[in-house]
Amino acid sequence: MTEHLLHERDGAVLTLRLNRPDKKNALTGAMYTSMAEGLRAAATDDSIRAVMIAGGSDFTAGNDLADFAKAGSGGPRPGAAFEFLQAIRVFPKPVVAGVRGVAIGIGTTMLLHCDAVVTARDAKLQMPFARLGLVPEGGSSVLLARRVGQARASWWLLSGEAFSGATAAEAGLALESVDDGAVEATARRYADQLAALPPGAVAESKRLLREPLMPMLEAAMDAERVAFSARLQTPEAQAIFASFFAKKAG
């Protein structure tokens, strides 16, 4: 448990709430670890039938760039992020996400592993990996095109261009797009609906839906992890991080 991730239990639904509002919920290693631990514990707790992931006024600004810079200059590699992605990939129960504000990088790619996503119409989603000198992660190199089509996936991943929550829903990345103030209530309604169903049937249905993709997804995520870790070490990426922090300091 970390103070930046709250575990909120209400009935059969566990909410993992990102709680670092001063940094727009930018994710640290401790937050990733706590999310992974929360998912693993929920997977074996029969009283939990669905998990909801939420933030506050922002979903998440993605990985804390300071951690990326440290990893690229000889610091710890971003293993905790990959641990979380593995945990959500294999999680057997329904996962619902409520997205408000910004959802950057892994804040968008993790949605590909959720079973229902609700976005605020004016939410800002973005996968700026190439802009940071990096590559896609979270299986997005294969999952995104299956969800939104090859043309959109290629553009969003290569250009790093931001798009709205309304566009995410229109493209099929989200199930529904609503007013900002209605996001959590709508997401919770979906979570409650799934939690009320026979749990064995829901888990088996989720397995059948995802199992055909698993070999390809495992291979893609392994390849992404190797490429992502290597890109962090490149002068190109390190120069981008240094420029970012120089501008921030100025």
Image: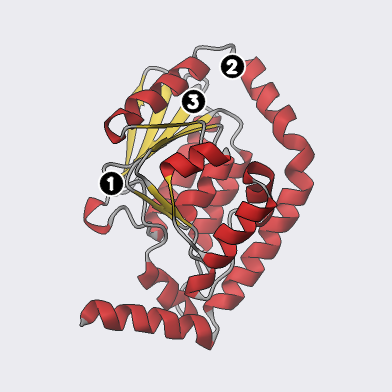
Position of the C terminus, as image quadrant, is bottom left
Counting other residues with Cα less than 10 Å from the Cα at mark 2, is it few (<14), some (14-19), or many (20 or more)?
some
Say if mark 1 contacts mark 3, CB within 8 Å. no
Amino acid bearing label 1: Asn
Instruction: Pick whichever of labels 2 and 3 is earlier in the sequence.
Output: 3
Three-letter amino acid code at the position of disc 3: Ala
Residue 87: percent from left, percent from top: 56, 45
Q: CA distance from mark 1 to mark 3?
A: 20 Å
The residue sitting at 48% across, 61% down in the picture is: 161
Instruction: Please report the residue visible at 57 percent of the width from the left and 28 percent of the height from the top.
Output: 93
Tag shown at residue 63: none
Locate residue 241, reporting x and y percent. Answer: 40, 79
Tag 1, which secondary structure? loop
Question: As shown in the figure, which amino acid type bears the numbered disc 2?
Answer: Pro
Which of marks 1 and 2 precedes in the sequence? 1
Category of crowding for the residue at label 1, using alpha-carbon neighbours closer than 10 angstroms: few (below 14), some (14–19), many (at least 20): many
Q: Are marks 2 and 1 in contact (CB under 8 Å)?
A: no
Q: How is the image coloured?
A: secondary structure
Mark 3: secondary structure: strand
Compare residues 86 and 127 and report the one nearer the observer: 127
Give the labeled residue for mark 1: 19
- Local crowd size for mark 3, using a 10 Å CA cut-off: few (<14), some (14–19), many (≥20): many
Does residue 94 appear in the picture of this structure?
A: yes
The numbered dot on residue 50 is 3
Mark 2–mark 3 distance (CA, rounded to whole Å) = 9 Å
**Residue, x 34% and y 78% (percent of image)?**
244
Residue carrying label 2: 199
Quadrant location of the N terminus in the rendered image:
top left
Q: Secondary structure at mark 2?
A: helix
Residue 188 x, y percent position in the rendering: 39, 24
Query: Where residue 207 appears, x then y in whole percent?
Result: 70, 30
In the figure, residue 5 lies in which quadrant?
top left
